[in-house]
Amino acid sequence: MLVAIVLLLAGCGGTSDAGSCEPKTGECPNVCDAGPAQSGQLCSLDDRCACGLACKDNGSGSFVCQAYDGESAGCTGCEGGEPPGDTTTPPPPSNGELLGSGGAVPGAATLTVIADTLLNAPSDLEFHPDHPNQIWVANHANDSLTVIVNPGESNQKVYQFVSAGHHFLGEVVSLAFGDNETFATCGESQNEQVEENPPDFMGPVMWPADLDDFLASPGNVDGIHWDMLHDTPLCMGIAAAGGNAYYVFNGLIGVIDWYDFKEPHEPGGGDHTDGLKKRFLSPGVKREPGVPSHLDYDMNTGWLYVADTGNSRVLRLDTNTGEFVDILTHYSNENPMDLYSGIKGEQVVSAASGHLVSPSGIIRHEGVLYVTDNANGKIQAFDDAGALINSLDTGLAPGALSGLDVGPDNRLYLVDRLANRVLRVDPN
């Protein structure tokens, strides 16, 4: 049970311009202490909120001063009084306004074409964190990456970079930028096209996040990769976890894996001996062939948000939980994979809600989860409790939607896999 504390602007039994604050019996200590923190401001259970407010969990692991809701908060607190009239009103919670006026209709927003060349079944995109004028795109159909420079501007340029060996970018479906000017990719491949390597010898690949490195090797970028680890064939999504670590969606056996590349080998090298690997045995996830299952990781809380496509739901996993149970050894040139069980998982949006059919793209922005549905062309916005707060029917055909990102202009950008386009959502 969450214990909330009601904290007031005047002392117990005292008065203020906002009204009296009379104590009631309850479980919380010092419920009538004076406090400066106003509605919407961060607090802890030792802080003091203004009269009529309680320090409560906002649903994403942070505590903020919120309107007191009585017994359901776990503490009766004090009655009477209103927040002072001269306080600054905090901005209202986001209502998923990046999708426009709502109503699940195409007219709620305009889809602006940003790029429609050098794209081949684009499945994911992400803005470069250090160069926000660059969008990097993963192309599923031809094992390549596309980089869009100055998107939407008159001086826009588009480049494509191919993996000729079909291994390092084999059927790539997802990418994520990490730290240290690096990013990683993974693909829906079981290494079918590389006969000299064993079956299922696939997993995340780490790359330098410098466009100049790719421009120097336009015909085949295999030789500039920085590292690769190999226990996640049919990888359907990837999310950066800080440093050189990443979470990935293992579509072959239906679990979430974690990798830390540690120190990368030399460009194009093959020394994988220092990389670390974990596997979360539960809760299980399910791949839908041909449909990416993207991930989004919250660095502040450790929650990993998962578009669990095959199960028509969105999960979040507390990556700070779990217990080591065993090891799995596959390759002599890599460390064994540690196996963990008991991971705390929650359904943010369940299949039973009926909101999602084939969730694919996912991003959490300003407390709102934006999820694309590959089955019906909709983008939906949910709060942390899983309530639907906005929806946009893009009008795109089934199979079109997948990855999405929020640009520096606070607009959603997404891929159209069928028409080979990158689009921007402009709310009407």
Image (cartoon, helix red, strand yellow):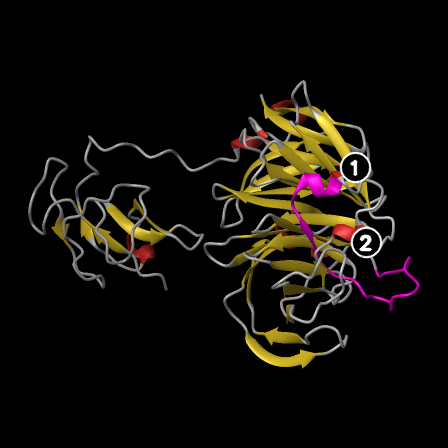
Coordinates of residue 105 in the picture (x, y in percent):
65, 28
Residue beneath the point at 49% across and 35% down: 95
Coordinates of residue 375 in the picture (x, y in percent):
75, 43
**Viewer-proximal residue, 165 or 48?**
165
Q: Is 210 one of the magenta-colored residues?
A: yes
In the shown orientation, is residue 13 left or right of residue 249? left
Disc 1: which residue:
160
Disc 2: which residue:
289
Coordinates of residue 261 in the picture (x, y in percent):
64, 63
Res 325 visible = yes
Residue beneath the point at 57% across and 51% down: 180
**What range is drawn magenta here?**
190-214
- Answer above or below: position of 54 versus 334: above
Coordinates of residue 32 in the picture (x, y in percent):
15, 53
Instruction: Name the element at disc 1.
Output: strand
Report the disc number at residue 412: none
Q: Mark 1–mark 2 contact, CB under 8 Å?
A: no
**Viewer-proximal residue, 348 or 34?**
34
Instruction: Name the element at disc 2.
Output: loop
Q: Residue furthest top?
A: 154
On-image quarter of the C terminus: top right
In the shown orientation, is residue 331 left or right of residue 42? right
Q: Is 376 one of the magenta-colored residues?
A: no
Q: Residue 115's image quarter?
A: top right
Q: Mark 2: few, some, or many residues within 10 Å (few <14, many ≥20)?
A: few
